[in-house]
Image (cartoon, coloured by chain):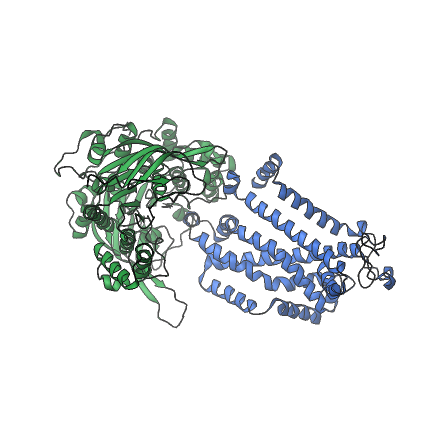
Chain colours: A green, B blue
Amino acid sequence: MTELPPALEINALTVQYPAPEGGFVSAVEGVSLNVRRGEIHAVIGESGAGKTTIGNAAMGLLEASAHIPSGTIHIGGKPLDMARGSAEGVVLGRDIGAIFQDPMTSLNPLFTVESQLVETLRTHLKLDRKEASAQALELLRAVGIPEPERRLKSYPHQLSGGQRQRVVIAAALACGPSLIVADEPTTALDVSVQAQILKLLRDLCDTRNIGVLLVTHNMGVVAQIADRVTIMHKARVVESGPTAEVLRRPQAEYSRALIAAVPRLDVKLDRFPVLSGAGDAASAQARAAIGSGAGRVSAATDGSEILKVDGLCVDYRSAGWNPLAKAQRFRAVDNVSFAVRKGEIFGLVGESGCGKTTIANVISGLVRPTAGQVHYEGRLIEGKGAERRTGALRQSIQMIFQDPYSSLNGRMRIGSILAEPILFYKLAPNADQAERDVRQLIEAVGLAPDAAERYAHAFSGGQRQRLSIARALGPRPQLIVCDEPTSSLDVSVQAQILNLLKDLRDATGLTLLLISHDLAVVRQMCDRVAVMQAGKLVEEADTDTLFDTPQHDYTRNLLSLVPTLDSIRGEPLSSPLSQPLTSGNNHG
Amino acid sequence: MMTKSVALKLGRSLPPLSVCLSGGLALIIIGGAFLAPWLAPYDPTDLASYDLMNAEYPPAFVEGGDPRFLLGTDNQGRDLLSAMMYGARVSIFIGGGAVLLSAMIGVFLGLVAGYYGGKVDALIMRCADVILSFPTILLALLVSGLARAVFPQAASAQWAPFILIAALATHEWVQYARTVRAATMVEGAKDYVRATKVIGLPARRIMLRHILPNVMGPVLVIATINLAGAVLTEATLSFLGVGMPPTYPSLGTLIRIGNEFLFSGIWWIAAFPAIVLVLLVLAVNVVGDWLRDRFNPKLRARS
């Protein structure tokens, strides 16, 4: 085995793209890394760090505008021709397998699993139809799909997300590659499915002696399966080495900050440690001003119930084209009851499709429940005989959405977006005052007030999410429903946004209902937590109680599957958590 | 606020050459059309000025041409240049009017259908389907015929353009409605629209202020393409005798007339109006595309 060259060898690679204002920007600069056979090498970094570009460069899938001034790539010892993006005797699909992020789109919906696999096999290995079919079946067995004979004839839409990703892995494995490039292979999957896919990748890597270049942003995933890790920041390698060494004893300041920003499942911290906090004096002052602002009930955290959900059921009907056919009903939320107390952060967790977002939509008035009631401060707001939500009632419940890229209207200036609810509810006597209020809101979420003049596209994802929060604060709500507020953000940005939400809660006495699939985030943020599974509430408890002594099997199972930094591959399991994890200026 | 800043931007940086040329061309054609009574050498609506002796003169720069008639004459001895200037006036008025009216109706109904969905949507879209099942010409004939039956002056030169606009719009709004409905459904499911619902803004405001600007892109594209279609459909209707009276020929009517003579070597009657029509449509398309991108803040930042 030692005489085999590494599966992938990248040397001082620089990839540049033409910049809009002329010249070039480097997506990757002077990056060197090796992926040995039988080894998983993780490339981790925040969005825009250049990690995907490395994967694409290795596969020869760079965009046509990419410019490579220097660097070499060897695949299995064979040099890659940089101009053509391919190496002599190396074929994408045969020698390099690719696994992409979204299993929903990486399979062609018009072909069966069999034909997709057989096509690859026949093209590259020149097998006849029968041999290829047999081989495809073998591959499905290898990736652990239940009932592989039946699944061969299935179309992608008949498979679950995890099964689809297994098929994608099978296709990547089809021709016995020496290298697999996996770009965020589990990001679109639930934790339980993620755990299975990661285990599969690890097993395949070990048994088939394949090198895996794993591109990810999830530190827990790295800790769980990677042998070596390369941390990237702004197109450059910050740190590289064996996983346990890098994660436990990060040398570079950026690595330390990145690792510290990962929400922890084991201990609740007051605030996330962040490098440069949004907690400067001006924004703290603005928050305080909003907190004491007119029309706001003072932070009365007397433990009384602000929101009460009683026996809530929501059915979705599949609206078919045939009016005579019986409509298919799907119960998204099934008899859910819980109460949220004034001033607390209440968490609702569960895997995708468990109905948590539907509950958020009912509370904020976007979806009508089929049965059950929702009370807000003793007033019936949803259910039979509910009063119409207008004026103050409408104002007092606001929402923050998951996707910061679609939650701001791209055709309006930020100032107009934020001023709209203020003017609509006449919370400011005139336009000048409204503009001052808008500036105060922008400052309160940690941005410069001149943001009001710009359009949404001028801001990054994290900044947009801050603006979304500012918009939600505009109507002076009592309760904010946060639907996965950070799940599309980088960890360091996530830490800032979560800190901001906590700061706002402390300054204004807001009540937050936090919907999330991320157990670690919930642990860090929430006072009480409810766990949902398939439309039902399975467990509800104080956060510490729930995480330390989970009662329900489902909760226990979920908790055990979350990849964390507690146990790092290549380390004895009982290793105590060492100190450098809590560094950075811990404000608050 | 928005228009002011756009105006400032326009002043600061000149649009690309193709847009400048197209804009100039469109201005010349439209200006020539609307100033026809002052610029045109003859008045083609004045029957007394025709002389059959002058019929079918080729353009002045071709052998056998008459210097009095720069672009030649048609089969009735009308000066082609004058007829085209007056004809463009009719075409632009009817084409533009039909596009505007159908876009307004279609965008409104599409927004309502896409936003509310359910029964409202079903009602509007089934009406649209019924209308689509008629050919444009048949429906326009029906509308013009009905108009003439109840309103005797409908065939006069004064009223015919409005009847034509209504007839064309009856069919054309469906395209806008379908496009806008689909785009509204997509936009309506996005978080920024959901946010406005949670804030509690009234439906009218959400539709007009938040959704409408985000669905206008395809509408502009359809509108610029439909302008050409409307001009040609008008020509067909005039040819069938329910459009403009023959004494007020439009560009389309001239092309129709010229078409009959094309194979006898008299090419100019069809060619010149057709060239003007193509140039007009092209110019409007280029300018329309540029305006659409210019009004999109996302693209404006990049360019």
Where residue A446 sits, quadrant-wise, is: top left
Left or right? Give the position of A463 relative to A165: right
Q: Is residue A286 visible?
A: yes
Where residue A214 sits, quadrant-wise, is: top left
Q: Position of residue B169 (x, y in %)?
A: 62, 61
Left or right? Give the position of B267 relative to A559: right
Front residue of A448 and A321: A321
Quadrant where the C terminus of chain A is found in the figure: top left
Indicate whether B302 appears above or below B109. above
Quadrant where the N terminus of chain A is found in the figure: top left
The residue drawn where x is 37% and y is 61% is: A110
Q: Is residue B159 visible?
A: no
Front residue of A178 and A359: A178
Q: Position of residue A428 (x, y in %)?
A: 47, 38
Q: How many marks?
A: 0
The residue drawn where x is 16% and y is 47% is: A550
Q: Position of residue A185 (x, y in %)?
A: 29, 47
The residue drawn where x is 55% and y is 62% is: B174
Front residue of B91 and A387: B91
Indicate whether A199 appears above or below A33. below
Indicate whether B39 appears above or below B75. above
Front residue of B184 and A104: A104
Q: Position of residue B202 (x, y in %)?
A: 47, 51
